[in-house]
Amino acid sequence: WHINLVALNAVVDVESGRGCGEPTKEALEELMGAVELFRADFGALFDRGAERVRLMTPQGRLLDGDTALHALVDLWCRTRTSVHGAIAVPLTAALAVDRIAEKHGREVIRPGRSRRALAQAVLDGRAAFAGSTVGGFIFGDFFPAFDGVLSVGMLARMMAAEMTTLDQVVDDLPAFHKEHIAVFCPTDRKGVVMRAVTDAASGLSPDLEEGVRVRYDDGWALVLPDAGDPVVNVWAEADGVDAARERAREWARVVEEVVA
């Protein structure tokens, strides 16, 4: 694929399955310096298993998981026109994905939040591309699993095909406003909490496939207990920052009232 690659600390820990969290200040400075020094088209931070990746633009912008997903979806839609199939994203993905896909005549499905659900959607033919909000991407015509190295190669290839830069792609993406609140909840109270949330959403035609997801004219809200930690997660999206924050707080209060 004719990619000039500069590797820093290229050690893979295959025993680790943890995703890309916030990088350390040292790692971020090192990557930013390398991107500037080598005039790179982009920088990439891999998780320990090289399954997920965080992206940095030539201008030094470290992309959050949603923005990276939107950029990959946009480039995939533009360059993979010969590949037929939907785009699979998690329940927590912003509606900007739908707007990008609609512009290119693509369908978006939300099979669940786990990478297993995303991979299964590709394996059973419901989707040709899948992407998470934590740096994991699946290119169905190559390999039906998260692969950070493949994602970097495909990103470079798609940008070259479009003769564009990552900064240009990001600048042209639709705006989105999403909020996340993690509410402490003892494990033995999660069932009671989710029943209360279901009752609170009963008049709003909620989707109960995974957690409780409520749709609004300008967005959505999702309440979902963490599978391991004593936490109930609340996500919300709306037309504006304040509206998204207030929507998330509204559902967080429902959880807090039951836990208290």
Image (cartoon, rainbow, N blue to C red):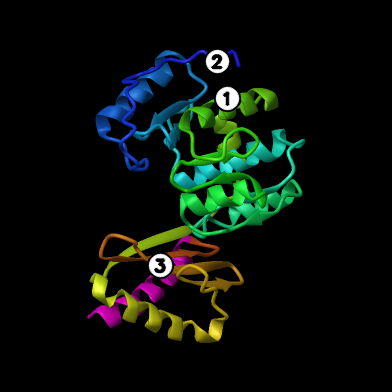
Estimate the spatial distance between the alpha carbons at disc 2 and disc 3, rounded to whole Å.
41 Å
What is the number of the mark on residue 107? none
Tell me the element at label 2.
Answer: loop
Real-space Cα separation, disc 3 to disc 1, in angstroms: 35 Å
Say which element carries label 3: strand
Say few, some or many: other residues with alpha carbon within 10 Å of mark 3 (under 14 / 14 to 19 / 20 or more).
some
Q: Nearer the viewer, residue 21 or 171?
A: 21
Any magenta on residue 13? no
- The dot on residue 3 is 2
Q: Is disc 1 placed on a helix, strand or loop?
A: helix
Q: Which residue is mark 1?
A: 156
Q: Is residue 152 above or below residue 77?
A: above
Disc 3 target residue: 224
Marks 2 & 3, CB-CB < 8 Å contact: no
Q: Amino acid at mark 2?
A: Ile
Q: Position of residue 148 (x, y in %)?
A: 47, 32
The residue mark sitting in front, 3 or 1, is: 3
Of callouts 2 and 3, which one flags the residue occurring earlier in the amino acid sequence?
2
> Are there few (<14), some (14-19), or many (20+) residues within 10 Å of tag 1?
some
Residue depicted at 61% across the width and 47% down the height: 122
Q: Which residues are the magenta region?
A: 241-260
CB atoms of marks 1 and 2 within 8 Å: yes
Residue type, numbered disc 3: Leu
